[in-house]
Amino acid sequence: MTVRIGTRASKLALTQSQQAADQLAAVGGFPVELVRIKTEGDVRTGSLSQMGGTGVFVAALRDALLENACDVAVHSLKDLPTGAAPGLTIAATPKRVDVRDALCARDGLKLADLPAGSKVGTGSPRRGAQLRAARPDLDVVDIRGNVDTRLGRVPGLAGNAEDSPGDLDAVVLAAAGLERISRLDVVTEFFETDVMLPAPGQGSLAIECRTADAPGPSDPAEGSQGALAQALAALNDEDTRLAVTAERAVLARLEAGCAAPVGAYAYRKGSMLYLEAVVCAVDGSASVREKKASDGLTEVGATLLGIEVAELLLAAGAADITDLAASR
């Protein structure tokens, strides 16, 4: 049986979905094909926050899974809502790549070198808030579009595009996405987490399937379903799973969507799981940052760690500086 991989049709989505498909095929020994699916986020214009942010890139993929139009779907994990999707399971989180955000500026400039008033583009309120906190004198511009479209708005970064507007001094993008499409050459500075905490789940993929096809203790030893479940289990990286579980638990407890000005980063080191998170005012005028560690190296332990950090953020006044549903 050919395993059908549901994916958005952008260059980045196709690239990361093909990488996941190749890994599944290599492990499972079955043929694969990509099924391109157009999502609400690909069709609608305007800022992500105006569209509601959470789920605009995944709902159509999930519908395709439930309607048997594909067998698995590949998501950027940071795009997934934190709530459970009935009938579906995140079956694998492959090993995470670079979690950092990256500045892509004209003339090789770093953040500290950009002249006052420089126009920096991003579609993320989280990035915008942390940019404004670091450099209040910059003009942060809300932008949309795929990676090439965004790079095309910075002089000298458009590649082969001849009609790029070149109206921005820089853009901020996820290093992971640039790495996956081999465009790290445009990065002029990687932001360390003390300057810009990434989005929960950034740098990680989520491979989702119907719950009946997910890995579990009762997987059949033979047949296509068993082969798919075993291949999905083989692609899962447990340290990545723990980290993103903790990060997403912060969002869930705050009841903040993926477009909220919330950053979180967790990682395992030895017998401990470390988590740091920040909530920012959209205008960058204030922020609350907390961190904590746990030796609970299970999904339950990681979830509890995320909840504890979220409670620390709320106790420190996070709800006073940005709109959080948890405070209502």
Image (spheres, rainbow, N blue to C red):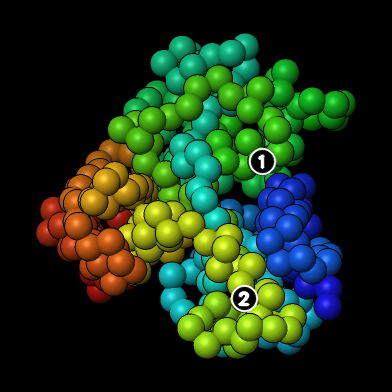
Query: Which secondary structure, mark 1?
Result: helix
Q: Report the quarter where the C terminus lies.
A: bottom left
Which residue occupies 20% across, 48% down? 291
**Which amino acid type is shown beneath numbered disc 2?**
Ala
Which residue occupies 64% across, 36% down? 178
Q: Report the quarter where the N terminus lies.
A: bottom right
Percent across and percent down for residue 275 are 27, 50
For residue 166, what is the image quadrant?
Answer: top right
Q: Residue under circle 1?
A: 180
Neighbourhood count class around disc 1 (C-alpha, 10 Å): few under 14, some 14–19, many 20 upward: some
Which residue occupies 37% across, 60% down? 242
Q: Is residue 7 above or below residue 151?
A: below
Q: Residue under circle 2?
A: 229
Q: Looking at the image, how many numbered discs can be counted on the residues?
A: 2
Percent across and percent down for residue 255 are 34, 69
Q: Is residue 134 visible?
A: yes
Between 47 and 295, the residue placed more toward the observer is: 295
Q: Is residue 28 left or right of residue 169?
A: right
Percent across and percent down for residue 11 are 77, 47
Q: Tell me the number on the disc at residue 278.
A: none
For the residues labelled 2 and 1, the Cα–Cα distance comes to 25 Å
